[in-house]
Each structure stands twice: as structure tokens, then as C-alpha cells.
Image (cartoon, grey):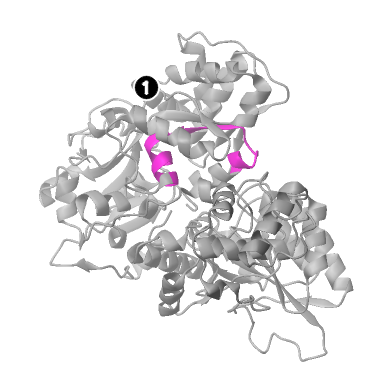
Amino acid sequence: MPSMGLRARHIAAPVSLHVSVLVVLLASLLVACDTAAVESGTSLSTSVTTGALPNVRVAAPTDCNLNAACAPGMRLVYSAELSSSLVPVTIDAAMTVLDNGDADVAVISSLEPDIALGGRSDLVVLDDDKGMIGPGNIVPIVRQAAVDSTGSELMTTLDAISSLLEERPLAQLVADVETLGSEQAAAAKAVAGANVSLPRGSNEGTLKVGAQSFTESRVLAHVYAEALNSAGYTAEVVDINGYRSTMLLSIVFGDVDLTPEYLAPLADFIAGYGVIDWSDPAAGLAQLRDLISARDLVAAEASPAQSTNAFVMRADKAQELGVSNLSDLAALLPRAEAVAFPSDSPTLMEGSGPDDPGVGASGERVVDVQLILLGLGFDPGEPDGYFGQQTRAAVAQFQQSQGLQADGVVGPATWEALNNPNPIDPGFFEPEPPAPPGVAPPSTERPDSGSGKVVYLTFDDGPNGTYTPQVLDLLEKYDAKATFFVTGQNVTSNPELSARIADAGHSVQSHTWNHADLRKLDRATFNAQVRDTNAAIEKAVGARPSCLRPPYGARNERVTGWLAEEGMQMVLWDVDPQDWRKPGANTIYSEVIEHVKDGSVILLHDAGGNRDQTVQALSRILETLSSKGYRFVAGCN
């Protein structure tokens, strides 16, 4: 396939380009060693056999450890452990790190290496000689609701737009961003110069085209928006301020209507590494469509253009080390057993969407859920058809018993399990403790009995440049302290905002590097998720976290044991208004106020999608609870 034809060679082409680095998320899902950990000599504990190997440093985006064409691929295909050699970098910065001599290898997104590397005769691309990298054709992912509202002509138009993205024009398109000064200008030039007839169409409102936080994704989003506008639609680009996992959440929950994505990276991210067979890209596209259909998403046809990972070295260094392909590079890295990554239910099928029964929902479907849970021995409260906190807790407990993401929402996989449950361990029928473990703050923070009630506000998934400052302003207004469970990748992207959280007296704790389902990770990747995030937090705020909140609440005995070995406490929650579903600010507010008690741990979100409802509800929550005599205390300090 074309993406596997990157032969090791000197680069010679006359175009200059500020390189766009590959981004692949998730999930659940994207890990790397923090720069501070690398500089301090900290490395990951992995089951590898080390010898007298050169200290080969690999500059790669911060999602490398969960990118099938990076660390997991090197482990699976080349039996090499890349994690401990990583120098994590921000998007578009890998080549700068390579040029500065701070890395020996750079992982870049290569539309076409001859153009992407701008005629650099001092660089070589290492051949993927064992076929690790799958096809990176551009595929528009669309919400079914957007297709239903515009008609089938939309998909036909998107197919035509994709057809104009041929290999060299696509590479030139990204190069034009630098010469023309903006993604929109480069996109307008490409669409105006394309010899493609676009089917006409129209829509009510505006189609929102999602763009991830790197140059290539942004310019592609502008191409689709520009072409849709020229075909009679009304479209605009929306920056989602994140990468693949954030993009998936944004499109599932309707913040955007469509987004250009990459075939193999997206399918591998959803399904689990090493699951998709890329010997037939057409079959891979069919599998991708099956995977996303569970979330009411559809995929248009793939473009002929591909954007694939490329491992790049300085020519002199490659000659010095005798490296011309990835097998040669693997021989210089610590050895690792090939890990068979889980192939169980895909993330999007396990997870839940905004239309699935969850907090605030009512009606016959909720009655059905409650009656089934009662029949299975769980206690959802009175089967009254209203999905409140007791039903949420029962659903989450049932999901935990079935090995599903315990998000407390009845998505497709949970519906299936309710009707065909696996045998349930009697231990799951034990009542949950009134407060989750690992949340109580130091005694100096906790007021004496009778001096007031305490509530622990917690915020997940940030920091986010739009919503976290709004949350911080509200907390300051009410003299409230909170605990922020942050992802390592967002801390790395927003170090100043992370420092602001800590400087305001709030607690900054871990939510893994990229919201990964810890149950699905091998030990080396688990270590990277935990240790890289700890290092990123310590670098940004000056203090290492002591607590971790597992994404989705997903844990098992293995995860609990590993976390204890890392010396960290697991933090859950007991009041969850499921604000991530965007059930309405009134529902978020009422679910908190009606169920809060002294010592409650409240789960809210300051990132991961549009959080306007959360901010609106938070203002009222703070006002009401303050009037009721509650103090807001930060935990895990």
C-alpha cells in the first residue's frame, strides 16, 4: 500500500515547510514521557532486556504511546520498547527538536516526504520495512443527524471534495499555509484551483467542520468548509482545542457535524491496536464504518491522499549508527515482548452518547432499565421512570460487574449486557461506601465536627483554555477550593493555566495522560499513563499528585494493585450529574443540590467538549450550597 512505501533515502525537494507533526489520540484515548522526566533521567519501568545500547532519543507527539504507528506499533511489530526513549514534543515541533540536537529521531506526519521535509538533503526517512503503518487516507466522519437534515447529497458532495485531495496537491496545500499565511487562504487556493465538479446542495443553519489542534487537520477542515460553501452549503470551521479523543467526543455530542480524519489511525484508536487488518484498506474502511455506526456516525469515501507517520533521522547520525529502516532503529532500542492489545468491545461501543438513558432522562426506557436492574439484584430505587442518582449508581455498579465503562449511562453495550448479562459476582451487590476512598483532605483542612459542612468539588479532563478560567473565576468569587483531575496532555498544552489552578489554592491531581481506560493497558503503558502525567503536573505546578481518578471510573483488581504500587490513591465520586451529557444546566444543578450531603464528592467537567451548561450550573451550585453553610475543600493535598 502507498503508506508503506517510505523508503530510506535522502530528501530532495525545493519547498520549505514548517512541519506538521502527527496527532492520533484517546478513550479513551495518548501517552508520552514528559520532557522533565526525560531531562531528569527518569525512565519507565518496563519488562525489557537492556544492553549496551546507544542513547537513542525519539522526538514524537505526546500521543506516541497510544498511537498504533508509534510506540505500540514498535512494540507489537518490531518488538522494541520506544517509551523510555521518547522526548515528548508539542505538535509541529519535532523537527525543531531534531535540528537542535535534542533528539536523534523525529516522528512527523508525512504527506509526501519530498515536500514535507522541504528539500532537506541532510535528512533521511526510515523505511517501515515490516508494515507497521496503516493507510492514512483522509476520511470525512459525519454525524448521521447532519446527513438526515441535509439529505444524501451531502455525502455525495463530501466524496467529491475528498477526490480533489491527491497526494502531492495535499502536501502542497499544507506548504501553502506558511506561504499564504493562514489555513483558510491555503484552502481557498486549493478549492479554486481544483478541477472537480461539486454536487450542489443546501442546509439549514451551519455545518460545523471540526479541526484538531495541528496545522494539517486545520487546513483540511478549511478545505471541506470552503468547498461545501462553494457547493451551496453553509459551513464553518470549529477548533476543538484537542486531538482525536476530544474530536470524537465533540462529534458524538453534536459540537461539530463532521471532521476530516485519517483511516488507519482512527480505526486503530477506536478498535484497539493490532485488531484491524490493513492488508485490504477497503475492508478496513468497512470495519471503521461498523465501529462508528454504534454512535450514529457515518464515514464518507476515503480520499486518494494519505498522510502517514514517518520516522526521520539526520543523515550523518543514520550513517554513524547504521540505520536505514525501522528494524535497524528497533535494534538500538530496548527489547520488549510484543504485547497483544485487547480486542474486546471498541471504546465507542462501550461508551455512551447524549441520547442514551442517563441522569435527567425519563420515560419507558428508564422504567425498563430500572426493572431489569431490580431483577438482576441491583437497587436503582423506585422504578418511577426518572433516571436519578440512585439509578445512575446502580447502572455504574452493573457496568462494573460486566467489565464495561462504568459511566452510569445506558449505551449500546450496556443495553446488550442488561439483556444478556455475564454471571455477576455476589460481591457487586455489596453497598457502595458513602464516600469513595482517597478523597479525604488532611486533618488541617477538615473543620471540626459542628463547624460546618464540607463538599468536595472535582473537575475532570482539563485544563481547557475556554472553560477552566471560567470555573476558576466562579470558585474565587465564592472562596471555594476544588480538586482538578487533569490529563497529562492538557497540562503539557496549558502549563500556565495549570499553574494558575495550583496558585489559587486548588489541588491538581491525575486523570491519566489522555483519558485512557486503564483496564485495557499492559503494565508498561499503565506506567507511562501514570508516571508521565505525574511528571507533567510536577513540572507545571511544582508538586507531584498523590491521587488519580480513573477515566470512566474503570478499574479492576489489577488496576487497583498497580496504582497502589505507584503509591497513589484512587478517587471516585458519589454525586454525578453527568454534565458531560449536557442534560441542561437545570438538571445539573438540581441533581447536585438534591443529593449533596456533608462529605459529598461531586463530579463535574471543565473540558472534553462544550461546558457552557456546567459553568451555568456551577454558579448556582456555589451560591446555593454557600447559603446552606457548606465549605468547599480541596482534597488529596
> Is 502 placed above or below 168 here?
below
Q: Nearer the viewer, residue 362 or 243?
A: 362
Q: Residue at x 14, y 42 (%)?
A: 324
Task: Residue 536: give x, y in percent of width and height.
Answer: 47, 65
Q: Residues within 10 Å of mark 1 (few under 14, many from 20)?
A: some
Image check: 87 left or right of 260? left
* Residue 104 in view (yes/no): no
Res. 42 image quadrant: bottom left
Residue tagged 1: 304
> Is 102 placed above or below 599 here?
above
Q: Residue at x 76, y 53 (%)?
A: 360
Mark 1, secondary structure of its residue: loop
Quarter containing the C terminus = bottom right
Give the total number of marks visible in the rendering: 1
In the image, residue 257 lies in the stretch drawn in magenta: yes
* Residue 191 in view (yes/no): yes
In the image, residue 494 lies in the stretch drawn in magenta: no
Q: Which residues are magenta?
A: 250-270
Query: Disc 1 marks which amino acid?
Result: Pro
> Is 228 placed above or below 98 here?
above
Q: Nearer the viewer, residue 555 or 87?
A: 555
